[in-house]
Image: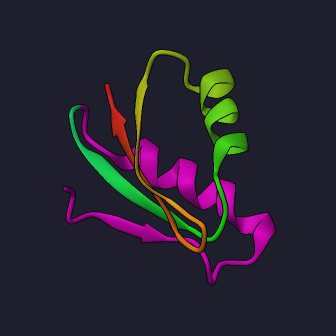
Amino acid sequence: MTNNQLDIRPIPPREKHPIIFATFDALPIGEEFQLVNDHDPMPLYYQFNAERPNQFGWEYVERGPEVWRVNISKK
């Protein structure tokens, strides 16, 4: 498991995706961070696929019902 955790639950909705992408863009290749959210971040997965195709890994660690954890890695 990663020690690099990004808990976006307290962040205002309009700021969440920009912060997540900034965190991802700052990662060295081969590194990852764990996203913590209060709902399934599947829309974010589709945005990653559109904006960073073939550049990321996506692994669910916990799937709710109250907390979702996803390890997002940079390829």
Q: Position of residue 41 (x, y in %)?
A: 64, 51
Q: Is residue 11 magenta?
A: yes
Q: Is residue 57 magenta?
A: no
Magenta residues span: 1-29
Quadrant position of the N terminus in the picture: bottom left
Residue nearer the viewer, 41 or 5: 41
Q: Which residue is painted at 34% across and 33% down in the image? A: 74
- Report the number of discs: 0
Q: Residue furthest top?
A: 54
Q: Which residue is painted at 31% across and 24% down in the image? A: 75
Q: Position of residue 38 (x, y in %)?
A: 63, 71
Q: Which residue is painted at 60% across and 32% down in the image? A: 48
Residue 16 falls in image quadrant: bottom right
Asked if residue 70 lies left or right of residue 13, the reply is: left
Q: Position of residue 72 (x, y in %)?
A: 40, 43
Q: Residue furthest front?
A: 65
Q: Position of residue 68 (x, y in %)?
A: 52, 62
Q: Residue furthest right?
A: 14
Residue 42 falls in image quadrant: top right
Above or below, comparing residue 53 to residue 35 in the picture: above
Above or below, comparing residue 42 to residue 63 in the picture: above
Above or below, comparing residue 7 to residue 2 in the picture: below
Residue 43 falls in image quadrant: top right
Asked if residue 32 lies left or right of residue 15, the reply is: left
Q: How is the image coloured?
A: rainbow
Asked if residue 14 lies left or right of residue 74, the reply is: right
Q: Which residue is painted at 55% across and 25% down in the image? A: 52
